[in-house]
Image (cartoon, rainbow, N blue to C red):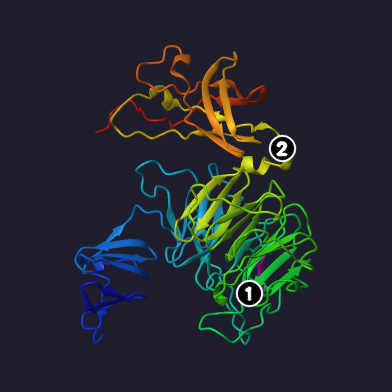
């Protein structure tokens, strides 16, 4: 309830829908505006200007709306990154794309590259409606997706092929109906993209991409008779990435299960885990067959606790790896596929990492807001961590240096990580000052580590070992990053036209990191621009467009 600061008879009640009373609650009417100027649904927050109660700011599942006439009409604020991601996933395209289910805003897909300055939501589009849930992408074509919205409404989608097919499992006549959680787990087998798993009160399996389904477990919950929405359901499903048929399932009423044989026999592995707590993730290892991680949440039990565990024997015994984590409910844990000691965990308040398999944790808080992290995906090929937050949309962090930041590297006085290749662009030759807005070139980052804080120099040398760019850095202890705009010192490029930026030329270069007499080197290759495919030549960017 929100009360007008100038009239205590005037109140708003938020929910679905939003209603308003001007006579102290004796009568109510809708306050969502006219159909043409209505706000998004599912209302959570409202503020009225104390000096002008007709000026109202409304928060809902779609972001923010503003009214200047007391709610008769609303104007949506579209330039705020406030998406509420439940789940996050990626494909293997070049560059890869991000997928996710959003609260009340469908299942969406979009680019992993940052949006251009001034852009809105270039490239992001809906692939399914409703309150978006789990989404999986077939790695064979990066086009076939499996997605669902609330209560198990599942679909197989391929926009290129014009396919949009419902694949929700249906119980047989006289059998108990399937119970679908608000967010029903949906899993594409990492070993065969024709095999799909889903969770009801059973683990369901399809061998034909969702066309037909079979229950491969009994009811894995306690079948509790509580609540006004389906409860006693599978909430976490996973299959070992190194062994086909090694399956894990967890339920909302706190039961954990494992199957060695593709679902023919299930063993309960709940002993050692907190009782009756929502299992948010069971994460099998990429390295050790018997290792599995678990996170649980006490949110629905009105408690805040960091429940996070590790088992080295398929869940027979569990070890608490909470260590120094704060008492925050945990929604997800991921093991890095390139470094067995590197873990990531998302809580109701932020993002954490451990570089020693859970013995110690650190907050990944630089530029990352304190916001609920509901899901994490690691794009192994790009070495990116993709973070799905509930309120601040999706974030991407490069983690290749973190993956290589071993105890041995950390012990070195300085260490320089080998940078990625740079691809030169044809547009660099046409670069010139202009007051027209131009697309900016994506930069590059250099990573290094230092055992102690101090002054460090980083130089970029040409093939003739001549410096073309120098950075003076006040380094901190641990990992450090230098962001490079792909420019070199103007005097190092002969014949550079007046006013054009000195982009680096194709060739072979060397990075040199120096701390006193200590030096580290790494090669840097700048490839020439790609030639366009026939019929896809780039337009002449020198032509002015008015």
Between disc 2 and disc 1, the foreground one is: 2
Mark yes or no: residue 312 visible. Answer: yes
Identify the residue at image location x=38%, y=23%: 430
Q: For this rendering, which residue is in front, 169 or 484?
A: 484
Question: Percent position (x, y) of residue 115?
Answer: 42, 44
Residue 118 vs 426, above or below: the answer is below
Residue 5 vs 367, above or below: the answer is below
Q: Which mark is residue 411?
A: 2
For the residues labelled 2 and 1, the Cα–Cα distance comes to 40 Å
Give the quarter of the figure containing the N terminus: bottom left
Question: Percent position (x, y) of residue 9?
Answer: 22, 80
Question: Percent position (x, y) of residue 464?
Answer: 59, 13
Residue hosting label 1: 277
Identify the residue at image location x=56%, y=85%: 226
Kindly state the secondary structure of the residue where label 2 is placed: helix
Asked if the stretch drawn in magenta spans residue 350, the answer is no
Identify the residue at image location x=57%, y=64%: 328
Position of 487 with respect to 415 (left or right) is left
Q: For this rendering, which residue is in front, 112 or 409?
A: 409
> Where is residue 129, by image quadrant?
bottom left
Identify the residue at image location x=63%, y=85%: 175
**First in residue order: circle 2 vs circle 1:** 1
- Packing grade of label 2 (10 A; few <14, some 14-19, many >=20) is some
Position of 131 with respect to 285 (left or right) is left
Q: For this rendering, which residue is in front, 127 or 68?
A: 68
Mark yes or no: residue 209 visible. Answer: no
Report the magenta residues as a range: 200-207
Q: Which mark is residue 238?
A: none
Position of 431 with respect to 442 (left or right) is left
Question: Percent position (x, y) of residue 43?
Answer: 36, 70
Position of 22 with respect to 354 (left or right) is left
């Amino acid at each position: 309830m929100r009360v007008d600061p100038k009239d205590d008879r005037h109140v708003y009640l938020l929910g679905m829908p939003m209603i308003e009373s001007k006579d102290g609650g004796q009568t109510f009417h809708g306050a969502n505006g006219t159909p043409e100027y209505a706000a998004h649904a599912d209302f959570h927050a409202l503020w009225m200007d104390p000096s002008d109660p007709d000026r109202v700011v409304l928060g809902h599942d779609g972001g923010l709306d503003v009214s200047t006439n007391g709610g008769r009409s609303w104007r949506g604020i579209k330039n705020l990154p406030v998406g509420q991601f439940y789940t996050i996933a990626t494909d293997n395209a070049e560059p890869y794309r991000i997928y996710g289910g959003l609260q009340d805003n469908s299942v969406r897909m979009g680019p992993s590259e940052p949006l251009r300055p001034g852009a809105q939501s270039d490239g992001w589009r809906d692939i399914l409606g409703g309150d978006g849930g789990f989404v999986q992408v077939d790695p064979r074509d990066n086009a076939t997706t499996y997605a669902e919205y609330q209560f198990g409404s599942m679909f197989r989608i391929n926009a290129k092929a014009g396919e949009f097919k419902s694949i929700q499992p249906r119980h047989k006549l006289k059998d108990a109906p399937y119970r679908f959680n608000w967010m029903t787990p949906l899993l594409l087998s990492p070993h065969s993209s024709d095999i799909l798993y889903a969770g009801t009160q059973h683990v369901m399996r399809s061998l034909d991409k969702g066309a037909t389904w079979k229950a491969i477990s009994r009811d894995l919950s306690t079948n509790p008779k509580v609540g006004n929405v389906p409860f006693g359901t599978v909430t976490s499903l996973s299959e070992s990435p190194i062994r086909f048929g090694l399956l894990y399932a967890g339920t909302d009423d706190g039961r954990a299960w494992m199957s060695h044989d593709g679902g023919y026999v299930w063993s309960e592995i709940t002993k050692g885990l907190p009782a009756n707590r929502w299992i948010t993730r069971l994460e099998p290892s990429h390295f050790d067959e018997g290792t599995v991680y678990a996170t649980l949440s006490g949110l629905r039990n009105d408690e805040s606790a960091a429940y996070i565990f590790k088992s080295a024997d398929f869940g027979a015994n569990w070890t608490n790896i909470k260590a120094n984590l704060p008492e925050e409910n945990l929604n997800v844990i991921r093991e890095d596929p390139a470094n067995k000691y590197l873990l990531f965990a998302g809580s109701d308040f932020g993002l954490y990492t451990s570089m020693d398999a859970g013995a110690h944790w650190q907050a990944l808080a630089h530029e990352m807001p304190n916001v609920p992290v509901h899901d994490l995906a690691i794009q192994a090929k790009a070495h990116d961590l993709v973070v799905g937050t509930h309120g601040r949309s999706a974030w991407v962090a490069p983690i290749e240096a973190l993956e290589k930041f071993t105890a041995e590297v950390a012990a070195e006085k300085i260490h320089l990580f080998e940078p990625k290749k740079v691809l030169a662009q044809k547009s660099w030759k046409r670069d010139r000052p202009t007051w027209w807005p131009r697309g900016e070139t994506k930069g590059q980052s250099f990573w290094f580590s230092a055992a102690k804080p101090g002054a460090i120099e980083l130089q970029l040398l040409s093939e003739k070992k001549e410096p073309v760019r120098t950075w003076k850095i006040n380094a901190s202890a641990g990992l450090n990053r230098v962001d490079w705009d792909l420019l070199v010192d103007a005097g190092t490029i002969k014949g550079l036209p007046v006013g054009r930026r000195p982009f680096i030329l194709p060739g072979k270069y060397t990075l040199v990191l120096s701390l006193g007499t200590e030096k580290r080197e790494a090669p840097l290759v700048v490839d020439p621009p790609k030639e366009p495919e026939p019929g896809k030549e780039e337009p002449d960017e020198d032509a002015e467009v008015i």
